[in-house]
């Protein structure tokens, strides 16, 4: 059974704080890792798709890194804003498995206080 | 708005009733996925279609669940004889092959 773990489960920060979360996944048969942001009552929004070991991606104040050899990815948010409050999900796709079905972690719920 | 729509957004039903959900994907996407999220868990894969062909079903998809995508466009997910354990958020996503999956807002099912 493939397991994707995310930590912490929840995080409360003040506006302006920088923060980061961790996603751990199986290091064997890696194909891709996805990050999504899911705000309440909205659709999960795709943030990044990461495929190469050492990959770093950035979108505004949010960035992510990938280490496929040790099986982890970090998501960083610089200068958190209240609108960053959401659940951040990572999802793993492995080779030899289904053609693209995502295996999700439980998510990290971020709350940013003004 | 990702371009994927789901209907209804909320459904409350009594145990034993049948329910049907609809997903309209992004029009040029030939892949369509269904996921289910229960409280405290991440979304779990249920099934996926490439065009009208249902290519994979999770063991989570019991005999009471059936999904269709008759013309390779919209899809329906039907649950027969609902049970309280079916209460969950049902998410639909669409994509091009090997590309990012774009999710709809989900249908929240409550079985009383």
Image (tube, rainbow, N blue to C red):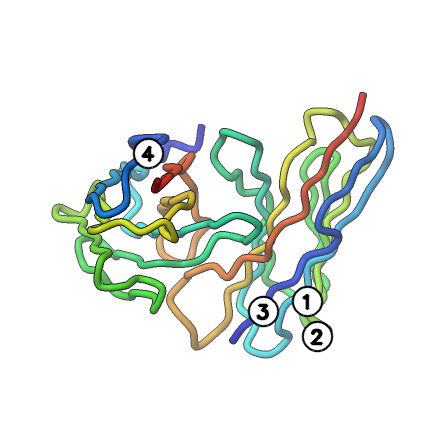
Query: What number is the disc on residue A53?
Result: 1
- What is the quadrant of the C terminus of chain B in the image? top left
Residue B105: image location, x then y, percent:
42, 34
Q: Secondary structure at mark 2?
A: loop
Q: CA distance from mark 3 to mark 2?
A: 16 Å
Labels 1 and 3 positioned on one and the same chain: yes
Which numbered disc covers residue A69? 2
Seen in the picture, residue B12 relative to B86 is either above or below; the reply is above
Distance between the alpha carbons at the discs numbered 3 and 4: 32 Å
**Which mark is nearer the camera, 3 or 2?**
3
Contact? badges 1 and 2 (CB < 8 Å):
yes
Give me the disc on residue B12: 4
Instruction: From the top left corner, tell me how far across and down residue B93 is, in percent.
Output: 38, 45
Tell me the chain of label 4: B
Are discs 3 and 4 less than 8 Å apart at CB? no
At a point 54% along the width and 57% down the height, the residue shown is A104
- State which tag comes first along the sequence, 3 or 2: 3
Chain designation of label 2: A
Q: Which of marks 2 and 1 precedes in the sequence?
A: 1
The quarter of the picture where the N terminus of chain B appears is top left
């Amino acid at each position: 059974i493939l397991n994707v773990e995310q930590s912490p489960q929840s995080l409360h920060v003040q506006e302006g704080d920088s923060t980061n979360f961790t996603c751990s996944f199986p290091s064997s048969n890696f194909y891709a890792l996805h990050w999504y942001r899911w705000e309440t009552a909205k659709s999960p929004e795709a943030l990044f798709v990461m495929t190469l070991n050492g990959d770093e991606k950035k979108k505004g104040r949010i960035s992510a890194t990938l280490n496929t050899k040790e099986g982890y990815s970090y998501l960083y948010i610089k200068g958190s804003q209240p609108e960053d409050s959401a659940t951040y999900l990572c999802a793993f796709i492995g080779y030899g498995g289904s053609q693209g079905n995502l295996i999700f972690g439980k998510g990290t719920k971020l709350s940013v206080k003004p | 708005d990702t371009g994927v729509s789901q209907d209804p957004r909320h459904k409350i039903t009594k145990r034993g009733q049948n329910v049907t959900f609809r997903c309209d994907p992004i029009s040029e996407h030939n892949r369509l996925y269904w996921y289910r999220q229960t409280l405290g868990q991440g979304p779990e894969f249920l099934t996926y279609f490439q065009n009208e062909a249902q290519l994979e079903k999770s063991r989570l998809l019991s005999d009471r669940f059936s999904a269709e995508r008759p013309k390779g466009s919209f899809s329906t997910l039907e649950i027969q004889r609902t049970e309280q354990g079916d209460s969950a958020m049902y998410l639909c996503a669409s994509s091009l092959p090997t590309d990012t999956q774009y999710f709809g807002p989900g249908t929240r099912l409550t079985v009383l």
